[in-house]
């Protein structure tokens, strides 16, 4: 298991190069262009994160985040979800950069390898900005009556959060 | 935009709650601290993020989505019964799923919208068809194999193995997508279009 895990990332890097060469792609040029795109993406989210992390840190310092955690703790514990991730669960479907801000605050504050830090990371990595996706897709094709799309997508999100919590508790003890 | 309200709400709640609980001084210093942490975070994550978008570029130029998409066709035809004979729609959904799996978000969204446009031909009066709902549900549940940004955040926090969350991410993604598909299929029976 550990060997597979350690191999995954290097193997994908090697595969990208070998497959690219095989298909006659200018591999090194592609790598550089792609990496530059990554830099541009990070630069683009930086202002958003500056503004959002400010709000998240203020909320944390005021004690409101802990109050929110306490408020939803009984319900979340019922599902086996660590209550500290309440803030992340609320913002994740609404805003991608907001979730990144809240998630990274949880990760740095609790430690990346802590139960909460890991659960937050897995939640972030296994979910999408649900309402944004729904708005973009239905907006693009002029759908006004979305029927069960929202409840069904939220069921998927909730199942993902529960699975993330259980998986972390199971895999990293 | 939702963030206008969310952000303003966050600031007002922290000030009001800070005043009530006597932690307003901490709120003041946190305002400055958060901004500095954001820049630190961005510098911390930009290495891994750029590496990953870099590695994905040769794959993308080599047309890996086009190669991969055929593998998903048989499953997808079951998920989209009314569009399964619409070759253009099925082509676009498969490529959309392939791009999502590889984390090529910039490619995935236009492909998904292309699929939605094809599927929307069967919809009337702006009512979503079952196929459209399924498309949206699948796209709002993440199926990305390598969540590079999260790994980058973990790396920035100084862990030895930023990618060791992968098995948990895969399991959670799979459960989430399956729950989405199942609930969509069940709700389609109860929540009829007419």
Image (cartoon, rainbow, N blue to C red):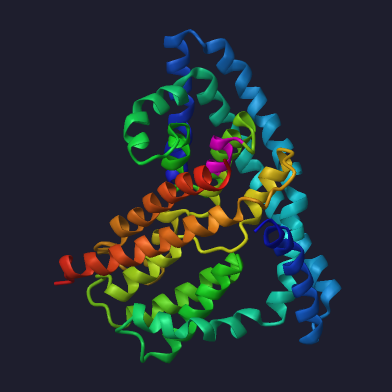
Tell whether position A116 is magenta. Answer: yes
Q: Position of residue A63 (x, y in %)?
A: 48, 19
User: What span is in magenta?
Assistant: A114-120
Question: Which image quarter holds the C terminus of chain B?
Answer: bottom left
Q: Position of residue A54 (x, y in %)?
A: 59, 30
Q: Position of residue B20 (x, y in %)?
A: 42, 10
Residue B142 horizontal side relative to residue A134, left or right: right
Q: Position of residue A64 (x, y in %)?
A: 45, 22
Please tell me which residue lies in front, B51 or A29.
B51
Tell whether position A54 is magenta. Answer: no
Residue A98 can be seen in this image: no
Q: Quadrant of residue B16?
A: top left
The residue at 56%/46% (across/down) is A97
Residue B101 sits above or below residue B124 on the image:
above
Residue B131 can be seen in this image: yes
Q: Quadrant of residue A13?
A: bottom right
Residue found at the far left of this picture: B194
The residue at 47%/36% (across/down) is A85
């Amino acid at each position: 298991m550990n060997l597979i895990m350690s191999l995954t990332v290097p193997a994908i890097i090697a595969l990208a190069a070998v497959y690219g060469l095989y298909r006659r792609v200018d591999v090194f040029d592609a790598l550089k262009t792609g990496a530059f795109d990554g830099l541009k993406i990070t630069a683009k989210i930086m202002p958003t994160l500056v503004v959002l992390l400010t709000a998240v840190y203020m909320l944390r310092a005021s004690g409101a985040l802990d109050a929110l955690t306490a408020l939803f703790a009984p319900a979340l514990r019922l599902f086996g979800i660590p209550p500290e991730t309440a803030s992340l669960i609320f913002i994740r479907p609404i805003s991608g950069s907001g979730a990144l801000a809240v998630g990274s605050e949880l990760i740095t504050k609790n430690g990346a390898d802590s139960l909460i830090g890991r659960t937050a990371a897995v939640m972030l990595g296994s979910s999408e900005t649900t309402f944004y996706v729904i708005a973009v897709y239905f907006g693009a094709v002029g759908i006004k009556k979305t029927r069960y799309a929202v409840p069904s997508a939220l069921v998927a999100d909730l199942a993902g959060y529960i699975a993330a919590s259980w998986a972390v508790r199971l895999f990293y003890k | 935009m939702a963030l206008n309200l969310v952000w303003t709400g966050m600031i007002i709640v922290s000030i009001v709650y800070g005043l009530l609980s006597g932690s307003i001084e901490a709120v003041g210093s946190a305002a400055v601290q958060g901004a500095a942490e954001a820049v630190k975070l961005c510098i911390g994550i930009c290495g891994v993020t750029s590496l990953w978008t870099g590695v994905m570029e040769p794959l993308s130029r080599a047309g890996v989505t086009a190669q991969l998409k055929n593998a998903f066709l048989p499953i997808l035809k079951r998920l989209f019964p009314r569009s399964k004979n619409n070759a253009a729609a099925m082509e676009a959904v498969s490529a959309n799923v392939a791009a999502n799996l590889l984390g090529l978000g910039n490619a995935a969204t236009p492909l998904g919208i292309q699929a939605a446009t094809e599927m929307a031909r069967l919809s009337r009066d702006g009512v979503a068809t079952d196929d459209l709902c399924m498309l949206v549900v699948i796209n709002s549940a993440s199926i990305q194999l390598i969540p590079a940004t999260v790994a980058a955040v973990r790396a920035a926090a100084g862990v030895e193995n930023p990618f060791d969350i992968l098995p948990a991410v895969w399991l959670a993604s799979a459960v989430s997508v399956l729950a989405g598909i199942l609930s969509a299929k069940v709700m389609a029976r109860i929540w009829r279009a007419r």
